[in-house]
Amino acid sequence: MASDLITETDLLPYEWPGSFFIGAEEIEEALKVLNARSPFRFYGPDLQRCVERLEAAYCKRLNRKYAIAVNSGTAALSLALAALGVGPGDEVLVPGYMWISCISAIVRSGAIPRLVDVDDTFCMDPADLEKKIGPHTKGVLLVHMSGAMGAVDKIAEICRKNKLFLLEDCAQANGATLKGRPAGSFGDMAIFSFQLNKNITAGEGGLVVCDDENLYRRSWAVHDLGYPRNADGRLEFSDPNYQMWGQGSRYAELLAAVMLAQLGKLEKITTEMRRRKYALKKRLSAIPGLTFRRIPDPDGDTGAFLLMIWKDRQTCLLVVEQSRKAGVHTGPLGMNNIAMTDWGLHIYFNNASLVRKSPLNNAGRPWSDPLNEFAKSYEYGKGTLPALDALVDRSSLLAIAPVLTDEAIERIAQAFENAAKA
Ligand SMILES: Cc1ncc(COP(=O)(O)O)c(C=O)c1O
């Protein structure tokens, strides 16, 4: 078999963009924290204030008033919904192409997720969003998927018109822009993730941004122990507006140190990915019947993923199989060059907990909550979102590493061309 001839060095680099750039700067920043013996963000013998500096850097990048770094993107989503006051009796509109953390944050809040279809950008379809808005809709969780934004400006407008909050999930689009405006600057709140698969990484981490002081103070209390802290980093209990329940999501100085160095490399990483992605896309554009995800602003695409739409499912599965045999895949730890239906918890109907409405506790909440009676008929199985179903059925996904060589790009292009011919 051809695959027997593929050596380890022929395989694609893993889809962990920021990890390739972890080097002297990250080590130096992390060492400063260790040498200062001050790994806790609020106090220590010689605090380096890395978490604080990371937050300030994000505020500046996105022209936002407030930022709070946390220990994961999942935690960032949960605390944003808590700050926005989401709970039983509310529904949050969310696209069917997302990550399970988006749904779990809504369910954990006691509210109901309502699925919205996608358009040809693979992001939320504003037309379907307008159809889904109902009396219980409290807000929209918009997910900028696979490295780029869709109709975010239209969706922000719809939210404003209908007095809904807009929470942007920028976990997969750190560094993306739309007509020069960065992901994370459109919504009432936005979240980021710094987990290994993201454009920049410290292995773990997340961040929330907003402009409203009340949202910020609520987020602050929830991300920690439920209360604010004073300038010395000690808990304050006196303000009744901020006596909340904390979720223990504080970020660590060591990881923030790594993130400070990574943030300095974000533009370089996205530029490298974008160049490679569009070179490959150009090479593949002659393949008959192959089209691509529509990117409203290619200059603002981070370039992390190429989504390919084939003539039909059979062609898609065959091309993936053949090109993988020709070496277009990563080692065993990666998920690259796959049919999109295999893209796990990114596709709503692959989420078993969602499809079967798994309860959060032994009272069956949030599904059994009388305040959520309005959502009794909501379904989450395949068939709920016809446009997304039809798209993912015949699409495949290729992650573009920022270190992909020109030779590898040529090899990928040839493998797809040969597979498509076959
Ligand atoms: C769109 C999206 N949202 C949220 C998250 C959650 O981030 P984390 O893994 O840091 O909890 C991810 C991570 O994969 C993601 O892709």
Image (cartoon, rainbow, N blue to C red):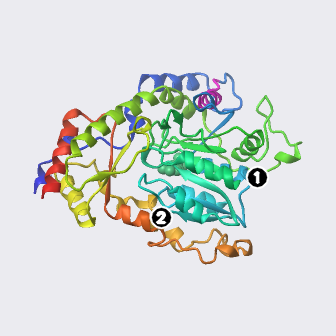
On the image, the x and y values in percent for residue 376 come to 63, 77
Secondary structure under tag 2 reads helix
Residue at the bottom extreme, as displayed? 377
Q: Is residue 49 magenta?
A: yes
Q: Are marks 2 and 1 in contact (CB under 8 Å)?
A: no
Question: Seen in the image, is 200 located left or right of residue 74?
Answer: left
Quadrant in the rendering for residue 249:
top right
Q: Which residue is mark 2?
A: 348
Circle 1: residue type: Trp
- Mark 2 is on which residue type? Tyr
- Identity of the residue drawn at 38% across and 39% down: 303
Apparent side of residue 230 relative to residue 374 in the rendered image (left or right)? right
* Quadrant in which the N terminus appears: bottom left
* Residue 150 relative to residue 35: left or right: left
Question: In this rendering, which labeled residue sits more in front, label 2 or label 1?
Answer: 2
Number of residues whose C-alpha sits closer than 10 Å to that of mark 1, classed few (under 14), some (14–19) or many (20 or more): some
| Magenta stretch in the rendered image | 48-58
Q: What residue sits right under mark 1 in the picture?
A: 245
> Where residue 278 sits in the image (x, y, percent)?
31, 38
Residue toward you, 347 or 29:
347
Q: Is mark 2 within 8 Å of ligand 1?
A: no
Main SS category, magenta section? helix
Pinpoint residue 157: horizontal percent, then vertical percent.
Answer: 62, 48
Label 2 packing within 10 angstroms: few (<14), some (14-19), many (20+)? many
Q: Secondary structure at mark 1?
A: loop
Q: Nearer the viewer, residue 199 or 22?
A: 199
